[in-house]
Protein backbone atom coordinates (compact mmCIF):
# COMPACT_ATOMS: atom_id res chain seq x y z
CA UNK A 1 0.00 0.00 0.00
CA UNK A 2 1.56 3.30 -1.06
CA UNK A 3 1.31 6.16 1.32
CA UNK A 4 -0.21 9.41 0.12
CA UNK A 5 1.48 11.89 2.42
CA UNK A 6 0.91 15.49 3.47
CA UNK A 7 1.58 17.86 0.57
CA UNK A 8 -0.04 15.45 -1.89
CA UNK A 9 -3.49 16.04 -3.35
CA UNK A 10 -6.88 14.55 -2.50
CA UNK A 11 -9.55 14.83 -5.23
CA UNK A 12 -13.17 14.95 -4.08
CA UNK A 13 -16.07 14.26 -6.45
CA UNK A 14 -18.88 16.43 -5.13
CA UNK A 15 -18.56 19.78 -3.37
CA UNK A 16 -21.26 19.73 -0.68
CA UNK A 17 -20.93 20.05 3.08
CA UNK A 18 -19.47 16.58 3.53
CA UNK A 19 -16.73 17.48 1.07
CA UNK A 20 -16.21 20.77 2.89
CA UNK A 21 -15.71 19.13 6.28
CA UNK A 22 -13.50 16.48 4.69
CA UNK A 23 -11.43 19.19 2.99
CA UNK A 24 -11.06 21.19 6.21
CA UNK A 25 -9.69 18.13 8.02
CA UNK A 26 -7.45 17.24 5.07
CA UNK A 27 -6.08 20.80 4.95
CA UNK A 28 -5.39 20.72 8.68
CA UNK A 29 -3.41 17.53 8.10
CA UNK A 30 -1.33 19.22 5.39
CA UNK A 31 -2.95 17.89 2.21
CA UNK A 32 -3.94 19.76 -0.92
CA UNK A 33 -7.59 19.39 -1.98
CA UNK A 34 -9.30 19.72 -5.33
CA UNK A 35 -13.03 19.21 -5.81
CA UNK A 36 -15.46 18.87 -8.71
CA UNK A 37 -18.98 20.25 -8.49
CA UNK A 38 -21.39 21.91 -10.95
CA UNK A 39 -22.07 24.81 -8.58
CA UNK A 40 -19.31 27.47 -8.58
CA UNK A 41 -17.95 28.25 -5.09
CA UNK A 42 -19.54 25.12 -3.70
CA UNK A 43 -19.31 24.54 0.09
CA UNK A 44 -16.20 22.42 -0.52
CA UNK A 45 -14.83 24.63 -3.29
CA UNK A 46 -14.71 27.56 -0.86
CA UNK A 47 -12.15 25.77 1.33
CA UNK A 48 -10.36 23.60 -1.24
CA UNK A 49 -7.22 24.66 -3.15
CA UNK A 50 -9.18 24.46 -6.39
CA UNK A 51 -12.54 23.51 -7.84
CA UNK A 52 -13.40 22.17 -11.27
CA UNK A 53 -16.87 23.46 -12.16
CA UNK A 54 -18.60 20.67 -14.10
CA UNK A 55 -21.39 18.09 -13.79
CA UNK A 56 -20.48 14.85 -11.94
CA UNK A 57 -20.91 12.82 -15.12
CA UNK A 58 -18.74 15.05 -17.36
CA UNK A 59 -16.09 12.41 -18.03
CA UNK A 60 -13.54 14.85 -19.45
CA UNK A 61 -13.78 16.99 -16.29
CA UNK A 62 -13.69 13.89 -14.09
CA UNK A 63 -10.49 12.77 -15.86
CA UNK A 64 -9.02 16.24 -15.31
CA UNK A 65 -9.74 15.84 -11.59
CA UNK A 66 -8.06 12.45 -11.77
CA UNK A 67 -4.88 13.90 -13.30
CA UNK A 68 -4.71 16.59 -10.62
CA UNK A 69 -5.09 14.23 -7.65
CA UNK A 70 -2.96 11.50 -6.02
CA UNK A 71 -6.02 9.81 -4.52
CA UNK A 72 -9.73 10.33 -5.16
CA UNK A 73 -12.91 9.95 -3.19
CA UNK A 74 -16.54 11.10 -3.38
CA UNK A 75 -18.78 12.79 -0.87
CA UNK A 76 -22.24 11.64 -1.93
CA UNK A 77 -23.39 8.33 -3.30
CA UNK A 78 -25.38 9.61 -6.24
CA UNK A 79 -22.19 10.52 -8.09
CA UNK A 80 -22.25 8.39 -11.23
CA UNK A 81 -20.57 5.00 -10.93
CA UNK A 82 -19.50 5.49 -14.57
CA UNK A 83 -17.36 8.46 -13.50
CA UNK A 84 -15.66 6.42 -10.80
CA UNK A 85 -15.15 3.53 -13.23
CA UNK A 86 -13.58 5.91 -15.75
CA UNK A 87 -11.06 6.97 -13.11
CA UNK A 88 -10.28 3.37 -12.15
CA UNK A 89 -9.86 2.46 -15.83
CA UNK A 90 -7.10 5.08 -16.04
CA UNK A 91 -5.35 3.51 -13.08
CA UNK A 92 -6.33 6.21 -10.58
CA UNK A 93 -6.65 5.33 -6.93
CA UNK A 94 -10.30 5.82 -5.90
CA UNK A 95 -11.80 4.91 -2.51
CA UNK A 96 -14.36 3.48 -1.95
CA UNK A 97 -14.25 1.55 -5.25
CA UNK A 98 -16.88 1.71 -8.01
CA UNK A 99 -17.93 -1.83 -7.01
CA UNK A 100 -18.95 -0.53 -3.57
CA UNK A 101 -20.73 2.43 -5.14
CA UNK A 102 -22.62 0.26 -7.63
CA UNK A 103 -24.16 -1.74 -4.76
CA UNK A 104 -24.81 1.05 -2.27
CA UNK A 105 -26.33 3.50 -4.74
CA UNK A 106 -28.91 0.97 -5.88
CA UNK A 107 -31.53 0.07 -3.24
CA UNK A 108 -32.41 -3.29 -4.74
CA UNK A 109 -28.80 -4.48 -5.04
CA UNK A 110 -28.06 -3.05 -1.60
CA UNK A 111 -30.92 -4.84 0.19
CA UNK A 112 -30.26 -8.08 -1.70
CA UNK A 113 -26.59 -7.90 -0.66
CA UNK A 114 -27.36 -7.21 3.02
CA UNK A 115 -29.97 -9.99 3.16
CA UNK A 116 -27.45 -12.40 1.57
CA UNK A 117 -25.23 -11.92 4.65
CA UNK A 118 -28.07 -13.15 6.86
CA UNK A 119 -28.63 -9.62 8.21
CA UNK A 120 -32.22 -8.41 8.70
CA UNK A 121 -33.76 -5.90 6.27
CA UNK A 122 -37.36 -4.71 5.91
CA UNK A 123 -39.35 -7.09 3.67
CA UNK A 124 -38.99 -5.86 0.07
CA UNK A 125 -39.84 -6.71 -3.54
CA UNK A 126 -38.55 -5.45 -6.88
CA UNK A 127 -41.27 -3.54 -8.74
CA UNK A 128 -41.37 -3.03 -12.52
CA UNK A 129 -45.10 -3.13 -13.28
CA UNK A 130 -48.56 -2.57 -11.82
CA UNK A 131 -48.83 -6.38 -11.49
CA UNK A 132 -45.70 -6.31 -9.30
CA UNK A 133 -47.35 -3.61 -7.17
CA UNK A 134 -50.44 -5.78 -6.71
CA UNK A 135 -48.39 -8.86 -5.87
CA UNK A 136 -46.25 -6.96 -3.32
CA UNK A 137 -49.43 -5.57 -1.74
CA UNK A 138 -50.75 -9.12 -1.31
CA UNK A 139 -47.48 -10.61 -0.10
CA UNK A 140 -46.14 -7.81 2.15
CA UNK A 141 -49.14 -5.56 2.74
CA UNK A 142 -49.62 -2.01 4.03
CA UNK A 143 -48.38 0.45 5.07
CA UNK A 144 -45.46 0.32 2.67
CA UNK A 145 -43.06 2.67 0.94
CA UNK A 146 -42.26 2.69 -2.76
CA UNK A 147 -38.73 3.89 -3.45
CA UNK A 148 -36.92 4.60 -6.70
CA UNK A 149 -33.96 2.19 -6.78
CA UNK A 150 -31.51 5.03 -7.31
CA UNK A 151 -31.13 8.78 -7.20
CA UNK A 152 -32.99 9.45 -3.93
CA UNK A 153 -31.72 11.31 -0.86
CA UNK A 154 -33.31 13.11 2.12
CA UNK A 155 -36.56 11.25 1.42
CA UNK A 156 -36.71 12.29 -2.24
CA UNK A 157 -37.81 9.58 -4.65
CA UNK A 158 -39.97 7.71 -2.15
CA UNK A 159 -43.70 7.62 -1.41
CA UNK A 160 -45.50 6.05 1.54
CA UNK A 161 -48.63 4.14 0.55
CA UNK A 162 -51.55 2.85 2.62
CA UNK A 163 -53.97 1.50 0.01
CA UNK A 164 -53.76 -0.23 -3.35
CA UNK A 165 -55.08 2.88 -5.02
CA UNK A 166 -52.34 5.02 -3.47
CA UNK A 167 -49.78 2.39 -4.46
CA UNK A 168 -50.86 2.41 -8.13
CA UNK A 169 -50.71 6.19 -8.16
CA UNK A 170 -47.27 6.25 -6.50
CA UNK A 171 -46.05 3.71 -9.06
CA UNK A 172 -47.09 6.09 -11.84
CA UNK A 173 -45.37 9.06 -10.23
CA UNK A 174 -42.12 7.20 -9.57
CA UNK A 175 -42.14 5.76 -13.10
CA UNK A 176 -42.27 9.29 -14.48
CA UNK A 177 -39.46 10.26 -12.08
CA UNK A 178 -37.32 7.24 -13.11
CA UNK A 179 -37.52 8.23 -16.80
CA UNK A 180 -35.14 11.09 -16.02
CA UNK A 181 -32.44 8.67 -14.86
CA UNK A 182 -32.95 5.36 -16.64
CA UNK A 183 -31.44 2.30 -14.96
CA UNK A 184 -31.36 -1.31 -15.98
CA UNK A 185 -33.76 -3.65 -14.23
CA UNK A 186 -36.74 -2.82 -12.02
CA UNK A 187 -36.96 0.95 -11.40
CA UNK A 188 -38.29 0.75 -7.84
CA UNK A 189 -38.73 -1.34 -4.73
CA UNK A 190 -41.67 -1.97 -2.46
CA UNK A 191 -40.63 -1.89 1.17
CA UNK A 192 -42.57 -2.84 4.24
CA UNK A 193 -43.11 0.22 6.48
CA UNK A 194 -41.30 -0.58 9.72
CA UNK A 195 -42.85 0.69 12.95
CA UNK A 196 -39.50 1.06 14.64
CA UNK A 197 -38.77 1.95 18.27
CA UNK A 198 -35.69 3.96 17.21
CA UNK A 199 -33.55 4.76 14.21
CA UNK A 200 -29.85 4.25 14.81
CA UNK A 201 -26.67 4.40 12.75
CA UNK A 202 -23.04 3.49 13.10
CA UNK A 203 -19.96 4.71 11.26
CA UNK A 204 -17.30 2.20 10.26
CA UNK A 205 -13.84 2.80 8.78
CA UNK A 206 -11.78 0.22 6.94
CA UNK A 207 -8.33 0.50 5.38
CA UNK A 208 -6.57 -1.38 2.58
CA UNK A 209 -4.97 -3.80 5.02
CA UNK A 210 -8.43 -4.80 6.24
CA UNK A 211 -8.21 -3.09 9.64
CA UNK A 212 -11.71 -2.03 10.62
CA UNK A 213 -12.77 0.35 13.41
CA UNK A 214 -16.23 1.52 14.41
CA UNK A 215 -17.67 4.59 16.12
CA UNK A 216 -20.28 4.42 18.89
CA UNK A 217 -23.92 3.76 17.98
CA UNK A 218 -25.90 6.94 17.29
CA UNK A 219 -29.63 7.47 17.81
CA UNK A 220 -31.30 9.53 15.08
CA UNK A 221 -34.58 11.39 14.65
CA UNK A 222 -35.80 12.36 11.19
CA UNK A 223 -38.32 15.10 10.43
CA UNK A 224 -39.92 15.00 6.95
CA UNK A 225 -37.46 12.19 6.11
CA UNK A 226 -34.48 14.49 6.73
CA UNK A 227 -32.13 13.87 9.63
CA UNK A 228 -32.97 16.30 12.43
CA UNK A 229 -31.17 15.12 15.57
CA UNK A 230 -28.34 12.69 16.36
CA UNK A 231 -27.59 11.64 19.89
CA UNK A 232 -24.58 9.70 21.16
CA UNK A 233 -24.18 7.33 22.89
CA UNK A 234 -27.49 5.83 21.76
CA UNK A 235 -29.86 4.93 24.61
CA UNK A 236 -29.95 1.19 23.87
CA UNK A 237 -28.79 -1.95 25.65
CA UNK A 238 -25.13 -3.03 25.26
CA UNK A 239 -26.46 -6.11 23.46
CA UNK A 240 -28.12 -4.00 20.74
CA UNK A 241 -24.98 -1.89 20.34
CA UNK A 242 -22.88 -5.05 20.00
CA UNK A 243 -25.26 -6.51 17.40
CA UNK A 244 -25.05 -3.25 15.43
CA UNK A 245 -21.25 -3.44 15.57
CA UNK A 246 -21.29 -6.99 14.17
CA UNK A 247 -23.57 -5.86 11.32
CA UNK A 248 -21.35 -2.89 10.47
CA UNK A 249 -18.22 -5.07 10.53
CA UNK A 250 -19.79 -7.76 8.33
CA UNK A 251 -20.92 -5.20 5.75
CA UNK A 252 -17.54 -3.41 5.63
CA UNK A 253 -15.62 -6.68 5.36
CA UNK A 254 -17.80 -8.20 2.64
CA UNK A 255 -17.79 -5.01 0.56
CA UNK A 256 -14.04 -4.58 1.25
CA UNK A 257 -14.72 -0.86 1.63
CA UNK A 258 -11.72 1.42 1.98
CA UNK A 259 -12.76 4.60 3.78
CA UNK A 260 -15.60 5.71 6.01
CA UNK A 261 -19.10 4.33 5.63
CA UNK A 262 -22.31 4.51 7.60
CA UNK A 263 -25.02 1.90 8.17
CA UNK A 264 -28.52 3.22 8.97
CA UNK A 265 -30.71 0.79 10.89
CA UNK A 266 -34.18 0.49 12.38
CA UNK A 267 -34.47 -0.92 15.89
CA UNK A 268 -37.68 -2.88 16.27
CA UNK A 269 -38.19 -4.35 19.75
CA UNK A 270 -34.68 -5.71 20.11
CA UNK A 271 -34.01 -6.61 16.50
CA UNK A 272 -32.04 -4.49 14.05
CA UNK A 273 -33.01 -4.13 10.39
CA UNK A 274 -30.63 -2.42 7.96
CA UNK A 275 -32.17 0.52 6.10
CA UNK A 276 -29.26 1.72 4.00
CA UNK A 277 -25.50 1.97 3.62
CA UNK A 278 -23.73 5.22 2.73
CA UNK A 279 -20.16 4.70 1.43
CA UNK A 280 -18.94 8.07 2.73
CA UNK A 281 -18.88 10.27 5.83
CA UNK A 282 -22.43 10.76 7.10
CA UNK A 283 -24.61 13.46 8.64
CA UNK A 284 -25.09 11.33 11.76
CA UNK A 285 -21.29 11.39 12.25
CA UNK A 286 -20.87 15.17 12.31
CA UNK A 287 -20.68 15.08 16.11
CA UNK A 288 -17.29 13.32 15.75
CA UNK A 289 -15.70 16.65 14.80
CA UNK A 290 -16.33 17.94 18.32
CA UNK A 291 -16.77 14.87 20.48
CA UNK A 292 -14.09 12.48 19.20
CA UNK A 293 -10.32 12.69 19.21
CA UNK A 294 -10.32 11.62 15.55
CA UNK A 295 -13.36 12.61 13.49
CA UNK A 296 -15.03 10.56 10.74
CA UNK A 297 -13.49 12.97 8.23
CA UNK A 298 -9.94 12.56 9.55
CA UNK A 299 -10.31 8.77 9.64
CA UNK A 300 -11.53 8.90 6.03
CA UNK A 301 -8.45 10.87 4.98
CA UNK A 302 -6.27 8.41 6.88
CA UNK A 303 -7.94 5.36 5.31
CA UNK A 304 -7.78 6.54 1.71
CA UNK A 305 -4.20 7.83 2.06
CA UNK A 306 -2.83 4.70 3.70
CA UNK A 307 -2.26 6.24 7.14
CA UNK A 308 -3.23 4.32 10.30
CA UNK A 309 -6.93 4.47 11.16
CA UNK A 310 -7.79 4.53 14.84
CA UNK A 311 -10.71 3.58 17.03
CA UNK A 312 -12.24 6.85 18.16
CA UNK A 313 -12.20 8.00 21.76
CA UNK A 314 -15.54 9.60 22.65
CA UNK A 315 -14.67 12.61 24.80
CA UNK A 316 -18.22 13.37 25.87
CA UNK A 317 -21.87 12.55 25.26
CA UNK A 318 -23.04 14.72 22.37
CA UNK A 319 -26.07 15.85 20.44
CA UNK A 320 -26.08 17.23 16.91
CA UNK A 321 -29.03 19.13 15.48
CA UNK A 322 -29.26 20.09 11.82
CA UNK A 323 -29.96 23.67 10.75
CA UNK A 324 -32.24 23.70 7.70
CA UNK A 325 -33.34 26.63 5.60
CA UNK A 326 -37.00 27.59 5.97
CA UNK A 327 -37.48 30.05 3.13
CA UNK A 328 -37.71 33.09 5.41
CA UNK A 329 -34.32 34.52 4.53
CA UNK A 330 -30.71 33.67 3.81
CA UNK A 331 -29.02 35.16 6.88
CA UNK A 332 -28.79 33.21 10.10
CA UNK A 333 -29.43 35.41 13.11
CA UNK A 334 -28.83 34.74 16.80
CA UNK A 335 -25.46 32.97 16.54
CA UNK A 336 -23.92 35.51 18.92
CA UNK A 337 -26.38 34.49 21.65
CA UNK A 338 -25.82 30.75 21.53
CA UNK A 339 -22.03 31.03 21.32
CA UNK A 340 -21.93 32.36 24.88
CA UNK A 341 -22.34 28.77 26.04
CA UNK A 342 -18.97 26.91 25.83
CA UNK A 343 -20.80 23.62 25.29
CA UNK A 344 -22.28 24.75 21.96
CA UNK A 345 -20.45 24.72 18.62
CA UNK A 346 -21.80 26.11 15.35
CA UNK A 347 -20.94 24.66 11.93
CA UNK A 348 -22.14 26.46 8.79
CA UNK A 349 -21.62 25.28 5.25
CA UNK A 350 -21.32 28.55 3.31
CA UNK A 351 -24.44 27.98 1.19
CA UNK A 352 -25.81 31.24 -0.11
CA UNK A 353 -29.47 30.36 -0.43
CA UNK A 354 -31.34 28.96 2.58
CA UNK A 355 -34.05 27.22 0.59
CA UNK A 356 -36.71 25.39 2.66
CA UNK A 357 -35.40 22.03 3.90
CA UNK A 358 -31.84 22.66 2.67
CA UNK A 359 -29.06 21.56 5.03
CA UNK A 360 -27.32 24.85 5.93
CA UNK A 361 -25.32 23.83 8.98
CA UNK A 362 -25.53 22.08 12.33
CA UNK A 363 -24.94 22.59 16.04
CA UNK A 364 -23.07 20.17 18.25
CA UNK A 365 -23.60 20.29 21.99
CA UNK A 366 -21.48 18.41 24.54
CA UNK A 367 -22.84 17.79 28.05
CA UNK A 368 -22.67 15.42 31.02
CA UNK A 369 -25.34 13.20 29.50
CA UNK A 370 -27.35 13.00 26.29
CA UNK A 371 -30.62 14.19 27.81
CA UNK A 372 -29.00 17.41 28.99
CA UNK A 373 -27.23 17.83 25.64
CA UNK A 374 -30.52 17.33 23.81
CA UNK A 375 -32.26 19.93 25.91
CA UNK A 376 -29.43 22.45 25.38
CA UNK A 377 -29.25 21.75 21.64
CA UNK A 378 -32.96 22.30 21.16
CA UNK A 379 -32.89 25.51 23.15
CA UNK A 380 -29.86 26.78 21.23
CA UNK A 381 -31.50 26.02 17.89
CA UNK A 382 -34.64 27.76 19.09
CA UNK A 383 -32.65 31.00 19.45
CA UNK A 384 -31.62 30.98 15.82
CA UNK A 385 -33.69 32.22 12.93
CA UNK A 386 -33.38 32.95 9.23
CA UNK A 387 -34.12 36.46 8.11
N1 LIG B 1 -39.30 1.02 5.32
C1 LIG B 1 -39.34 2.09 6.15
N2 LIG B 1 -39.99 2.02 7.32
C2 LIG B 1 -40.05 3.09 8.15
N3 LIG B 1 -39.45 4.26 7.90
C3 LIG B 1 -38.78 4.40 6.74
C4 LIG B 1 -38.68 3.32 5.81
N4 LIG B 1 -37.95 3.73 4.76
C5 LIG B 1 -37.60 5.01 5.03
N5 LIG B 1 -38.11 5.43 6.20
C6 LIG B 1 -37.93 6.77 6.81
O1 LIG B 1 -37.50 7.71 5.83
C7 LIG B 1 -36.14 8.13 6.09
C8 LIG B 1 -35.38 8.31 4.77
O2 LIG B 1 -35.39 7.10 4.03
P1 LIG B 1 -34.07 6.41 3.45
O3 LIG B 1 -34.48 5.13 2.82
O4 LIG B 1 -33.02 6.37 4.48
O5 LIG B 1 -33.70 7.37 2.24
P2 LIG B 1 -32.71 8.58 2.08
O6 LIG B 1 -32.00 8.80 3.40
O7 LIG B 1 -31.80 8.12 1.00
O8 LIG B 1 -33.59 9.70 1.68
C9 LIG B 1 -35.58 7.05 6.98
O9 LIG B 1 -34.49 7.50 7.74
C10 LIG B 1 -36.82 6.72 7.83
O10 LIG B 1 -37.04 7.70 8.81
MG1 LIG C 1 -31.24 7.43 4.73
Image: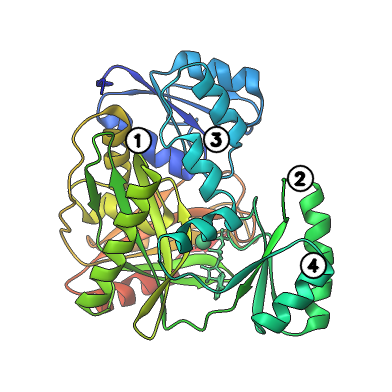
Cβ–Cβ below 8 Å for labels 1 and 3?
Answer: no
Q: Which mark is residue 42?
A: 3
Query: Is the shortest distance between ligand 2 and the CB of mark 1 under 8 Å?
Result: no
Q: Nearer the viewer, residue 286 or 141?
A: 141
Cβ–Cβ below 8 Å for labels 4 and 3?
Answer: no
Residue 200 as seen in the image, left or right of residue 83: left
Binning the other alpha carbons within 10 Å of mark 1 as few (below 14), some (14 to 19) or many (20 upward) gives some
**Inter-mark Cα distance, 1 to 3:** 14 Å
Q: Earlier in the sequence, mark 4 or mark 2?
A: 4
Q: Earlier in the sequence, mark 4 or mark 1?
A: 1
Q: Nearer the viewer, residue 317 or 131?
A: 131
Answer above or below: position of 302 versus 221. Answer: above
Q: Which quarter of the rendering shows the C terminus?
A: bottom right
Tell me the residue at 84%/72% (across/down): 169
**Residue 257, image x, y percentages:** 37, 42
Query: Is the shortest distance between ligand 1 and the CB of mark 3 under 8 Å?
Result: no
Please tell me whether mark 3 sits on a helix, a strand or a loop.
loop
Please tell me whether mark 2 sits on a helix, a strand or a loop.
loop
Please tell me whether mark 4 sits on a helix, a strand or a loop.
helix
Binning the other alpha carbons within 10 Å of mark 2 as few (below 14), some (14 to 19) or many (20 upward) gives few
Reading the image, the residue beneath label 2 is 182
Reading the image, the residue beneath label 4 is 171
Cβ–Cβ below 8 Å for labels 4 and 1?
Answer: no
**Residue 117, image x, y percentages:** 40, 60
* Number of marks in the rendered image: 4
**Inter-mark Cα distance, 2 to 3:** 27 Å
Reading the image, the residue beneath label 1 is 24
Quadrant of the rendered image holding ligand 1: bottom right
Viewer-nearest of discs 1 and 2: 2
Instruction: Determine the image quadrant of residue 64.
Output: top right
Binning the other alpha carbons within 10 Å of mark 3 as few (below 14), some (14 to 19) or many (20 upward) gives many
Q: Which quarter of the rendering shows the N terminus?
A: top left
Amino acid sequence: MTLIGPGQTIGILGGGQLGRMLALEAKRMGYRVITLDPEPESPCGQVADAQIVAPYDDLEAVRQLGRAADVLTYEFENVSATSVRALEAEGRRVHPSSAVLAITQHRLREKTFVASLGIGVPAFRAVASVEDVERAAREIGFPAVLKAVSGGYDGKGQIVVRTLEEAREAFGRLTAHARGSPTEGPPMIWEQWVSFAKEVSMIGVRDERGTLVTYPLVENTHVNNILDTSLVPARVSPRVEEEARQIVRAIGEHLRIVGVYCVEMFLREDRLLVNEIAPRPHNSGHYTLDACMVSQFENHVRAICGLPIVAPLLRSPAVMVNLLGDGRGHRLMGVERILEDPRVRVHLYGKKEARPGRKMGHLTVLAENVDEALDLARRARGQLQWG
